[in-house]
Image: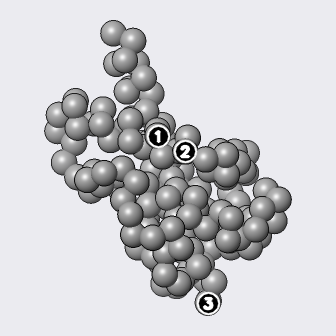
Amino acid sequence: MEEARSGDQNLSGDQNLSGDQNLSGDQNLSGDQNLSGDQNLSGVAESTLTMLLSSKEKGELLLLFHRNPGLMDDIEGIARRIGRSSSAIQSDLDDLVSIGVLGTVRIGSTNVVYLDRAKDKEVQDSIGEHIRSMRK
C-alpha cells in the first residue's frame, strides 16, 4: 500500500485547487522546522491556530474527525458527511493535511483521509502551551 502523508499530495491527486500560496508566511507548519526557541514554537502555534480557525468548513471537518476518530473516507464521502461539495472543502482538507492533523493514505486509486491522532495531539499541546503563555 502506497502512503502519502502530511501534505505530500493533495486529496484529489490533482493540482492544489487553492494555489501554491503558503498561508502562514515563511513558516513550515508540518513540524519539519527547528523549534528550539519559545518564540519559534509560539509563532508556529499562532500560525497553526489561525489556519485552524480560518473557515467554518475547517471547524466542521475537525469536529467530524474528533467525533469519529477512526473515520477513514475519501473527499466525496467526507463532503457528504458535512453537507458540502468536495470542491468546497478541497482547500480546507489540504490545509489540515499540510499541518498534519489529518493524514492521507492511498488505497487502490483512492486517497483516503483520516485523523492523525499523534500529530493532532502534538498540535493541540502546542496551541495549549501558546495560549497558556499568553496569560502570563
Q: Label 3 belongs to which residue?
A: 109
Residue located at (74% from left, 73% from top): 76
Residue located at (56% from left, 64% from top): 91
Say above or below: 22 vs 5.
above
- Three-letter amino acid code at disc 2? Ser
Distance (Cα) linking label 3 and label 1: 33 Å
Q: In this view, does 18 lie to the left or right of 45?
A: right
- Three-letter amino acid code at disc 3? Ser
Q: Name the one closer to the observer, 49 or 66.
A: 49
Secondary-structure class at tag 1: helix
Distance (Cα) linking label 2 and label 3: 30 Å
Secondary-structure class at tag 3: loop
Quick one: quadrant of the C terminus?
Answer: top left
Dividing the picture into quarters, in which one does residue 134 lie? top left
Q: Name the one closer to the observer, 3 or 8.
A: 8
Q: Name the one closer to the observer, 68 or 35.
A: 35
Q: Label 1 belongs to which residue?
A: 50
Q: Mark 2 or mark 3: which comes first in sequence?
A: 2
Disc 2: CA contacts within 10 A as few (<14), some (14-19) or many (>=20)? few
Residue 66 visible? The answer is no
